[in-house]
Amino acid sequence: MNGADRALWCAVLTHALHDAAKGKDQYWIGSADFRYVCTLAGLDPAAVEARFDPERFRALIRAA
């Protein structure tokens, strides 16, 4: 996988985390699809799940 592919999957993951932070499909986190997207983005799914804090993510969205 090249850098452009990884960047695309990171964008997909970021968008999905935004949705989850807003309460949309928050059950996606931890699913097989979530783990697959994390892997394609080059990230450890368990680490992403452990560090995901919806409140903090919402604050980042408002600040942007």
Image: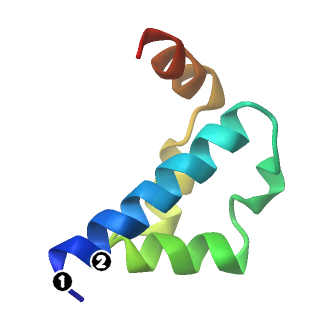
Instruction: List x then y, in percent, for residue 59.
Output: 53, 14
Residue 44, quarter of the rendered image: bottom left
Identify the residue at image location x=29%, y=72%.
6
- Left or right: 53, with 10 as reference point: right
Identify the residue at image location x=51%, y=22%.
61
Q: Which image quarter is the C terminus in?
A: top left
Badge 1 element: loop
Badge 2 element: helix
Circle 2/circle 1 CB separation < 8 Å: yes
Instruction: List x then y, in percent, for residue 11.
Output: 42, 56
Residue bearing the label numbered 2:
5
Residue 54, quarter of the rendered image: top right
Measured in 3D between alpha carbons, the distance from the residue under mark 2 to the one under mark 1, in whole angstroms, is 5 Å
- Left or right: 2, with 12 as reference point: left
Residue bearing the label numbered 1:
2
Q: 52 or 20, which is in the foreground?
A: 20
- Left or right: 26, with 35 as reference point: right
Q: Which residue lies furthest to the top in this view?
A: 63
- Left or right: 15, with 9 as reference point: right
Q: 56 or 7, which is in the foreground?
A: 7
When the figure is inspected, residue 15 is found, relative to residue 44, above or below; the finding is: above
